[in-house]
Image (tube, rainbow, N blue to C red):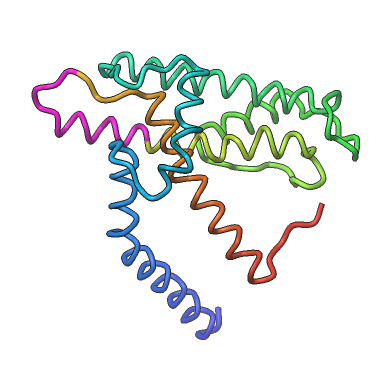
Amino acid sequence: MPIMEILFDIGGMLFLLAVLTLLVKPLGTYMNKCLSGQGYFLSPVLAPLENLIYKAADIKQDEEMDWKDYAKALLLFNGLGLIVLFLILLLQGILPLNPQGFPGFSLDLAFNTAVSFVTNTNWQAYSGESTASYLTQMSGLAVQNFLSAATGMCIALALIRGFTRHTSQTIGNFWQDMTKSVLYILLPISIIAALLLVSQGVYSEF
């Protein structure tokens, strides 16, 4: 490998490390305020939607879970997500938003892909634009890009609370943590990132 390519790669890694270091304090403060329920500048906009989700899903905001209930909720949520994504992939050929007429994934590929995206591995053994329909990409894979990342954040929150709450038997509410992670953190970041990419002329053709 030419020396300039090596230096370019090292420079890119150092730049990324510098950006992440600079974001630790402001982003960490923002995440802490949002996830702890202290509110932030997005609260007036997103709080009504958050409350609507709680009401629709019958989530009690003031009820916390012990580690067993938290783990059960996490496994149930991601288990259902795995089943739904698996079925979307398997039945893609008869589902709508498939103008190219892509057939459903094979049984093993559907299972492998579903497990991969639900666990946030996102390993693709196929070419997306020539295999996955619009519905599969939008309501299946893209949804799990958010939910699997939010699940990781929920696990981190539960672990931190377990260490810091010495006298408490509860570690939060999984459903509330999941909702806040998606609404206040992942969605805003994705929107900002998308706008930055569009401003640089990066776009996707369908």
Q: How many marks?
A: 0
The image position of residue 104, as x and y in percent, is 81, 28
In reply to whether residue 120 is colored magenta, the answer given is no
The percent coordinates of residue 117 (x first, y second) are 57, 35
Residue at point 51% right, 38% down? 120
Q: Determine whether, in the image, residue 12 is placed left or right of residue 104.
A: left
Question: In screen coordinates, is 18 left or right of 199?
Answer: left
- Quadrant location of residue 184? top left
Q: Which residues are magenta?
A: 154-169
Give me the residue at 79% from left, 47% from top.
129
Residue occupying image coordinates x 71% and y 39%: 137
Left or right of 198 on screen, residue 90: right
Q: Nearer the viewer, residue 9 or 94?
A: 94
Q: Which quadrant of the figure contains the N terminus?
A: bottom right
Magenta stretch, overall SS = helix
Q: Is residue 160 magenta?
A: yes
Identify whether 62 is placed above or below 43: above
Give above or below for 63 relative to 205: above
The answer to which image quadrant residue 166 occupies is top left
Expressed as whole percent of the image width and height from the top left, the position of residue 124 reads 65, 43
Task: Tell me which corner region of the image, top left, top right, bottom left or bottom right, holds residue 139.
Answer: top right
Name the residue at 49% across, 20% down: 77
The extreme left residue here reads: 167
Q: Is residue 148 above or below residue 91?
A: below
